[in-house]
Image (cartoon, helix red, strand yellow):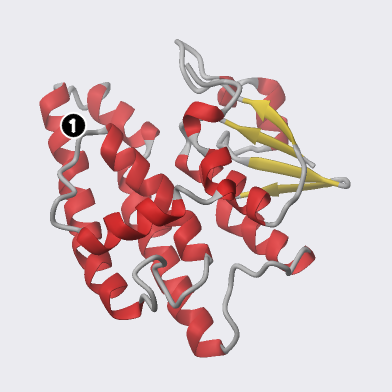
Amino acid sequence: MRLYTYFRSSAAYRVRIALNYKGLSYESVPVNLRGPVSEQRSASYLKLNPQGLVPLLEDEGQVLRQSLAIIEYLEETHPSPALLPVGASARAAVRALTLAIACDIHPLNNLRVLNYLRGPLGCEQPRVDAWYAHWIAQGFGALETEAARGTGDGRHLYGDAVTLADVCLVPQMYNARRMNCDLAGYPTLRAIEAHLTGLPAFAAAAPERQADAD
């Protein structure tokens, strides 16, 4: 397996966690998103992924895009240890938590959105920071309530085992901290994050431990 990744991409971070959790070895191929021209917009990378986004996973001739699709692929091809619980209703609950993070919180604060705010829209950094903090507060406020209801042990978003929702939570919490968002109002999320980041699969996937980190 080859994973095209960027150390601070939360979407790539998710996939690194999933690969580690399932005990799968892979080659990391850094894609530098910084600089005047991002490598993800290069002609060679756009041939692999016309969207020009990371992550991208190559596996035995398959080219897989979009972090959640990649993780679902890993779940189907390497089902143990599982990232989805048994039972349709439990799986739906985990997917709902996952999508709340990956589709409702993350896209609004993605790097390309922030760059558009700074660039063409001419927003100064304090306004960009306020935008980021607003959507974190909106998303985490609801997620805190859901976590308090769904956690089985105070250490996982749902039930008492690692799920796809946990895989998405940790990168989003990391980014919120990096942007100096106030997380005091989310004690359940912070307790879950503290437990998860201590697990080897999560710790090894952390941005600062990647080869392309600053």
The image quadrant that residue 211 belongs to is top right
**Local SS, label 1:** helix
Say above or below: 142 vs 191. Answer: below
Q: Is residue 160 left or right of residue 121?
A: right
Estimate the x, y position of residue 101 in percent, counting from the top left: 37, 58
Query: Which residue is at 26% across, 24% downward?
Result: 120
Estimate the x, y position of residue 90 in percent, counting from the top left: 49, 84
Query: Which residue is at 64% across, 55% downward?
Result: 21
Query: Which residue is at 24% across, 58% downward?
Result: 140
Q: Quadrant of the N terminus?
A: top right
Seen from the viewer's position, the closer of residues 53 and 180 is 180
Q: Please name the residue that numbered disc 1 is placed on.
A: 128
Instruction: Tell me the kind of residue under disc 1.
Output: Val
Say above or below: 141 vs 136. Answer: below
Seen from the viewer's position, the closer of residues 58 and 189 is 189
Say above or below: 11 vs 95. Answer: above
Estimate the x, y position of residue 80 in percent, counting from the top left: 73, 68
The image quadrant that residue 103 belongs to is bottom left
Estimate the x, y position of residue 132 in percent, counting from the top left: 21, 40
Q: Residue furthest right?
A: 60
Q: Residues within 10 Å of mark 1 (few under 14, many from 20)?
A: some
Query: Which residue is at 66% across, 41% downward?
Result: 56
Q: Residue furthest top?
A: 36
Q: How many marks?
A: 1
